Amino acid sequence: MPSTTKNVSSKESTMSISHFILLGFPSSPQMQLLYFGLFSVTYTLTLMGNVAIACAVRGDRRLHTPMYIFLANFSLLEICYVTTTVPNMLANFLSTSKSIPFVSCFAQFYFFFSFGCDEGFYLCIMAFDGYLAICRPLHYPRIMTRQLCTGLVIFGWLGGLIIFVIPVFLISRLPYCGPNIINHFVCDPVPLMMLSCSEDATTQSIYSAFNAIFMVGTFLFILCSYALVILAVLRMPSAASKHKAFVTCASHLTVVTLFYGSIMVMYVSPGSGHTEKKQKVITLFYSVITPLCNPLIYSLRNKEMKAALRKVFVPEILFLKYKS
């Protein structure tokens, strides 16, 4: 890029771009319609699955325990998380301009990554709750009080929203004077920083360090929690108790693997040589596919959850059938 462009002031260059172009998945109009239908179904199923989990917990008093309260909030968080990207992606499938205003782009960036950060916190909270329930069963009621449960729920929602203000502010203050085309379906920080008129090594380093500390820190916390849980389970004398504990651990660890596996590949080392197509596929996996799979993972082998789902939804279906 010419040096004259590099010397444009931050204020002038930021004002020179009023919108970005999200290319998404370039293809023929017929394929765009096919993508629209496919992701519309995926989004609808994701909403239905996570709403079902939240309603089942709310509707069955037997599930009014910290474990299921955390799970219900995690499901609501999944709804917020997927809604930050998919509706705009669906609109772009039907649009020819595929533009998004500058402010809206950074708002999407903020909420998408804030809710993603909150998901990491909730996975830590659920791992901590599992550790207390299995490794400290006699002390569990005294430790996991209503006040602590409420505080953890609030922290799980607000933690990412507060913390992610810093990287979003820093990246939004970079000078953007063109081009404005993002080869992605979401306002991702890596292509945004690549579009900046100047290379700000400090901002890139802060962003990379922030992601590495958050992801590795929360991931190690979860692994340590479940290492202690597995050791405690192995010492249980009852085979039935072992099986129930391992089923609960397996569900949570599957979600952890899906969530952290793809994100760590993508964001611990931004600019690590991923092709743009690979970046989009990885982002699509953890932002769309994972929220779709989580309700199934948490409910398929959970007898209490399946019973609650039947209790909440089957009577309503029978009532509608009888009424008709």
Image (spheres, grey):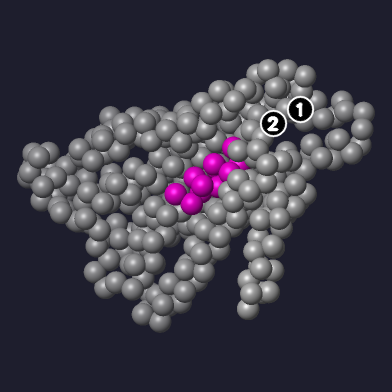
Which residue appears at 42% of the width and 60% of the height? 86
**Location of residue 44 in the rendering, given as x and y in whole percent from the top left corner:** 51, 64
Quadrant location of the C terminus? bottom right
What element does badge 2 sit on? helix
Amino acid at circle 1: Ile
The answer to which of 105 and 238 lies nearer the viewer is 238
The residue that label 2 is drawn on is 130
Q: Which residues are magenta?
A: 70-80
Tell me if residue 138 comes above or below residue 11 in the rendering. Answer: above
**In the picture provided, is 94 more to the left or to the right than 247?**
left
Percent of width and height locating residue 89: 38, 63
| Location of mark 1 (residue) | 134
For image coordinates 89% across by 39% down, the residue present is 240
Place of residue 151 in the rendered image (x, y in percent of width and height, measured from the top left)? 51, 26
Q: Secondary structure at mark 1?
A: helix
- Asked whether the beta carbons under mark 2 and mark 1 sit within 8 Å of each other, the answer is yes
* Amino acid residing under circle 2: Gly
Is 206 placed above or below 276 here? above
